[in-house]
Image: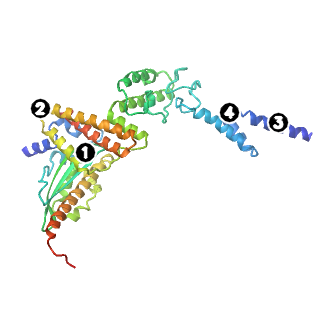
Amino acid sequence: MMLKQVAKKALGLTSRQSTPWSVGIFRSYHENVIDHYDNPRNVGSFDKNDPNVGTGLVGAPACGDVMKLQIKVDEKTGQIVDARFKTFGCGSAIASSSVATEWVKGKAMDDVLTIKNTEIAKHLSLPPVKLHCSMLAEDAIKAAVKDYKEKRVKTNGAAAAGETTQA
Amino acid sequence: MKKTKTMVASISTLIRRTYPSTNRCNSLATIQSQTQLPRESLQHHSSAEGRLRFSGRVFCSESGAGCWNCGEKAAFLFCNSCRSIQPVDDSVDYFQIFGLEKKYEIDPGSLEGKYKDWQKKLHPDLVHNKSKKERDYAAEQSAKVTEACRTLTKRLSRAMYIMKLNGVNVNEEETITDPTLLMEIMELREAISEADDSTSLNQIRSQVQEKLKQWSDSFVEAFESQKFDDAVKCIQRMTYYERACEEILKKL
């Protein structure tokens, strides 16, 4: 329960007033969204400077959302072993990134690049007006993988500087 | 006999050409039937109508012929002659409603007085005993004036509106990856969520307000020098800061 409080605090959801369904909207959130909101999985951060961590930082300026998704990769197998996220935005954005962290775990990096925003949106039954939230999550995954690969290139490049090139 | 007939025919054609009938539909039909009518007459017709429809200033109602009720030409939103509410004209923008120049910098204090003046004339509550048509006009005009006031009062919405008037749509749902901006916003939002007391929250708030003012000024600069890409970036930053302010207010 304390973890939940910490998680809620991390997401800036300390008071009940900030929960989405207390705002007078006609359409209520799907139970999957509420689930991810109440029990967010994988909230938190990895050390950005860890060579096995890829950080994807994306934003949706139209609604002022910002999303950080981090992956921890096993360098030998290229598999994502863990993921964390931190999102400031609406319930749909938070849920989308939470789902994203769940889905990338245990998958190969190239596999997660095929995760489409439409799949996330379908899982959460997002209304059309919130589709961009799932798009943001897809972009965050891609950004995290890209960051990790760039880091590898840098470290490998430094290591390979002294090696002879093969034909 | 024949000669008189042809003479009469040509005279009546002459009359029709020089004195086009006041009923638009009829005169158009006349034009169509008179295939030998030279082009100049047609242009004369359309320019005459053009003068009515697109009268120099935008201060005329949609129909182009003036007030729908009494025909008074200068009926802008409301006819002062017969006191009827006019239908919404989409070509009228928010700045025109408040009699302001189409510039980003306005005096927000000037809006409220004009807003009240308009609502005294346009509000639906004032037209209960009028026709359904006019009641509908009242509802639409009044809503438009309210929306105009709301848009122009706040800096951010005013900025986005003036960009829209210039053909630049800011609110597109694109993802950005600018690391500097996003890191800053991330840290800002984290600071807000960690702050527990009103002192620290208000401190953060004044910092954000400061940034808003700074970027608002940058927007003016970018907009006036037609650097629309930079202007969009300013608006994006302002959106983030506004969202942060909203979060602070929720916590306070």
The residue drawn where x is 15% and y is 36% is: A15
Q: Residue B133 at x, y = what percent?
A: 51, 29
First in residue order: circle 3 vs circle 4: 3
Q: Nearer the viewer, residue A162 or B59?
A: A162
**Alpha-carbon span between mark 2 and mark 3:** 92 Å
- State the image coordinates of residue B88 (x, y, percent, origin top left): 48, 32
The x, y position of residue B114, in whole percent, is 41, 23
Mark 4, residue position? B23
Residue type, numbered disc 2: Asp
Q: Which quarter of the picture shows residue B21?
A: top right
Q: How many C-alpha atoms fall within 10 Å of the one at disc 4: few (<14), some, or many (≥20)?
A: few
Tell me, yes or no, whether the two marked residues, 1 and 4, touch with CB atoms within 8 Å: no
Q: Give the residue number, with chain letter if any, for mark 2.
A: B197
Residue in view at x 13 percent, y 68 percent: A159
For residue A65, the mark is 1
The residue where tag 3 is placed is: B11
A97 to B238, vertically: above or below:
below
